[in-house]
Image (cartoon, helix red, strand yellow):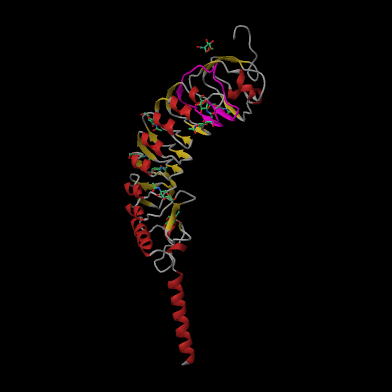
Amino acid sequence: MATTRMLGSTLLLILLSTVVSELCNPQDKKVLLQIKKDLNNPYLLASWNPSTDCCKWYTVTCDPKTHRINSLTIFSSVPDTNFSAQIPPSVGLLPYLETLEFHKLPKLTGPLQPAIAKLTNLKFLRISWTNLSGPVPTFLARLTNLTFLDLSFNNLTGPIPEALSQLSNLDALHLDRNHLTGSIPPSFGSFKSNPDIFLSHNNLSGPIPASLGNLNLTQVDLSRNKLVGDASALFGLNKTVQIVDLSRNELSFNLSNVEFPASLTSLDLNHNKVYGKLPVGLTALNLQYLNVSYNRLCGEIPMGGELQSFDVYSYLHNKCLCGSPLPSCTSSSL
Ligand SMILES: *[C@@H]1O[C@H](CO)[C@@H](O)[C@H](O)[C@H]1NC(C)=O
Ligand SMILES: *[C@@H]1O[C@H](CO)[C@@H](O)[C@H](O)[C@H]1NC(C)=O
Ligand SMILES: *[C@@H]1O[C@H](CO)[C@@H](O)[C@H](O)[C@H]1NC(C)=O
Ligand SMILES: *[C@@H]1O[C@H](CO)[C@@H](O)[C@H](O)[C@H]1NC(C)=O
Ligand SMILES: *[C@@H]1O[C@H](CO)[C@@H](O)[C@H](O)[C@H]1NC(C)=O
Ligand SMILES: *[C@@H]1O[C@H](CO)[C@@H](O)[C@H](O)[C@H]1NC(C)=O
Ligand SMILES: *[C@@H]1O[C@H](CO)[C@@H](O)[C@H](O)[C@H]1NC(C)=O
Ligand SMILES: *[C@@H]1O[C@H](CO)[C@@H](O)[C@H](O)[C@H]1NC(C)=O
Ligand SMILES: *[C@@H]1O[C@H](CO)[C@@H](O)[C@H](O)[C@H]1NC(C)=O
C-alpha cells in the first residue's frame, strides 16, 4: 500500500514537473505543429513531438525571458531531396521570430510566402539553395529590423524592388544566383547601413547606378550579369571598399584615371570591355587578388606594389597590355 502510494505521488510529481518545465508557449506550439503538418512531417522535424516542450525541439529556439519561439531554422547540410513543400503560411503566426531560415531544400518551391510580411521582428532571413520562384517581394522592405537578408541560390525572377533600400539596418544583402532582371535600383545609394551587396549570377542589365558611390561599402559582388557602362563610382581615394567583383559583365569605361582606395584588397574586372591603362595608383595598394584579364586595356603594367606578384592569367587577353609579368613592351605595343 505504502509503496503504491509513494509510486503514485512520484508519478504525480513527475507529471507536475513536466507540466511546469514545459516552457513553450501553447499558441507557438500549436503553430509549429501546423507547420510540421504543412511540410508533410519531414524527417528533419522528427524531434517535434507534441508531448514534449517545444522549446527543446531541434531547429527552433525560445527567447530565454518570454519563452516565445524566436528562431526557426530548417536546413539540411546535404541537399534534402525528400523535403518537398512550399513555405507554410503558418510561419506568419510566430510573431516573435527574429531568425527564419530554410536552406538546402531543393524541393522547397512556390513563392516567398506573403505571410512572412507579418514577421516584423525578423533580423535574419535566409531562404537559400531552394527552388523558390516568383519575384523578390516588395513587402520585405517593411521588415526594417532585418540585418541579414539572403535569398541566394533560388529560382527568383523579375526586378529587384527599389524599396529594399529602406532596410536601414541591413549589413548584408544576398540576391545572387537567381534569374533577376532589370537594373540595380538607383535607390540603393541611399542605404543607411552600407550593406555588403551580392547580386552576382543574375541577368541584371543597365548601368551601375552612380549613387552607389554615396555608400561606404566593404564588399560588392555584381559579377556575371549584363551590366554596362562606368563602374568608377565605386572607387575613389576616400572610399572604404575592400572586395570588388565586377567580372563577366559588359562594363566599358576608361580605367586610366580611376583612383583606388587604400582599403582595396581584391579587384576582379575579368571579361568586360574596360579600356585605357592600368593606373600607377594600383602599385600603392596591398592587393591580394587582381584580375583584369579579357578586357581592352593597353600600355605598360606599372612596376611595383603587388602587381608583379600575380601571374600572367591576371592580365591575359587585353588589347595591348605589356610589361612584367607579361612580355616586355616594345615600342610598337605602346
Ligand atoms: C530520404 O528518404 C529515403 C527513403 O525514405 C531515406 O533513405 C533517406 O535517408 C532520406 N534522406 C534524408 C536526407 O532524409
Ligand atoms: C531545383 O530543382 C532542379 C530540378 O529538380 C534541381 O536540378 C536544382 O538543383 C534545384 N535547385 C536548387 C537550387 O536546389
Ligand atoms: C524591431 O525590433 C524592436 C525590438 O527589438 C521592436 O521594438 C520594433 O517594433 C521592431 N520593428 C518593427 C518595424 O517592428
Ligand atoms: C525555375 O523555374 C522555372 C519555371 O517555374 C522552371 O522551368 C525551372 O526548371 C526552374 N529552375 C530550376 C533550376 O529548378
Ligand atoms: C539570362 O538570360 C538568358 C537569355 O534570356 C538565359 O539564357 C539565361 O539562362 C539567363 N541567366 C540567368 C542566370 O538567369
Ligand atoms: C561615409 O563615410 C563618410 C566619412 O566617414 C561620412 O561622412 C558619410 O556620411 C558616410 N556615408 C554613409 C552612407 O554612411
Ligand atoms: C568621399 O567624398 C565624398 C565627396 O566629397 C563624400 O560625399 C563621401 O562621404 C566621402 N566618403 C568617405 C568614406 O569619406
Ligand atoms: C583614357 O583616359 C586618358 C586620360 O584622360 C586619355 O589620355 C586616354 O586617351 C583615354 N583612353 C581612351 C581609350 O579613351
Ligand atoms: C582571371 O580570370 C580569368 C578568366 O576568368 C581566369 O582564366 C584566370 O584564371 C583568372 N586569374 C586568376 C589569378 O584567378
Ligand 2 occupies quarter: top left
Q: How many marks?
A: 0
Whole-percent x and y of residue 62?
Answer: 45, 59
Majority secondary structure of magenta residues? loop
Q: Residue at x 44, y 30 (%)?
A: 189
Instruction: Answer yes or no: is residue 203 visible.
Output: no
> Which residue lies most toward the top here?
332
98 w.r.t. 54: above or below: above
Q: Residue at x 60, y 27 (%)?
A: 262
Q: Residue at x 46, y 70 (%)?
A: 21
Taking the image as shown, residue 182 lies to the left or right of residue 171, namely left
Viewer-nearest residue: 64 or 281: 64
Q: Quadrant of the C terminus?
A: top right
Viewer-nearest residue: 67 or 156: 67
Taking the image as shown, residue 311 lies to the left or right of residue 28, namely right
Is 240 magenta? The answer is yes
Whole-percent x and y of residue 255?
Answer: 53, 18
Write the start and end of the magenta stretch as one range. 239-268
Q: Residue 42 falls in which quadrant of the image?
A: bottom left
Instruction: Answer yes or no: is residue 294 visible.
Output: yes
